[in-house]
Structures are given as structure tokens and as C-alpha cells.
Amino acid sequence: MLDPKKYTLKRALRPFSYSVAIITCGLGVLLAYRDGLGDDLRAMAVMVAGILLQVAVNLLNNHSDRTLWEQASVSEYPQKLQVLSIIQQHTLWGGRLRVLRY
């Protein structure tokens, strides 16, 4: 059963998963400070980049559902075209955020 509500921006961003980025990046920042290599600006950049990459991954993760929606019938899922458009938008936004890491 496909759930079109899964693709609302709030649910697609999956904020509960940001704890992964915060913990992993935060650990790296703490270890740098412990070793005397801490830098406030760099620490902030690492944390922001980690969270933005998590946002990008969350948005790109919906792309794999595209095939399921393409195969769904419009009579069963009248919002099919709208959901496909939203998935495409999320993929584009996620790709743009991912580019920021370079």
C-alpha cells in the first residue's frame, strides 16, 4: 500500500534521523577539541554540513519509490502524478544539497 502522505516535506525530511549526523559530527568535533585542534568556525561548519548531508540523503531516499508510483494505477491512486512530481522535487533538492559537500 502506497502512502502519499509519506512525501510531504515534513515527513520526507525525517528530522528524527538528524541525531545520527549530530552525534557523529559532534563526536569528531569533541575529539578535535580534546586533541587541542578545536576551531569554533570549523566545528560549526562540520555540524552544519553533516546535518545538510543528512537532509540531502533523506530527500534522495524517496527516489527509489518512483518506480512503485510509476507502476501504480491512477484509478487506485488519483494523486499519482502529484506524488511523482513531489518525488522529483525532493530528488532535485537533495542533489543540490549534496553538491554543497564539494
Image (cartoon, rainbow, N blue to C red):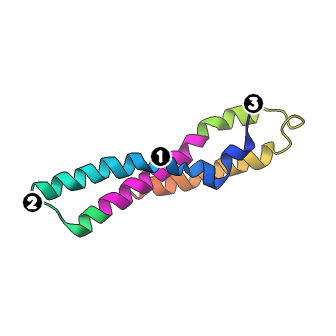
Residue on which the image places disc 1: 17
Mark found first going from the N terminus, 3 or 1: 3
Which residue lies most toward the right here? 75
Horizontal arrangement in the rendering, residue 66 relative to residue 41 (left or right): right
Q: Nearer the viewer, residue 84 or 9?
A: 9
Q: Which mark is residue 1?
A: 3
Mark found first going from the N terminus, 2 or 3: 3
Residue at left offset 44%, top offset 50%: 18
Q: Amino acid at mark 2?
A: Gly
- Quadrant the N terminus occupies: top right
* Residue 23 x/y as whole percent: 33, 48
Q: Give the CA distance from mark 3 to mark 1.
A: 24 Å
Which residue lies most toward the left here? 36
Residue on which the image places disc 2: 36
Q: Secondary structure at mark 1?
A: helix
Q: Amino acid at mark 1?
A: Ser
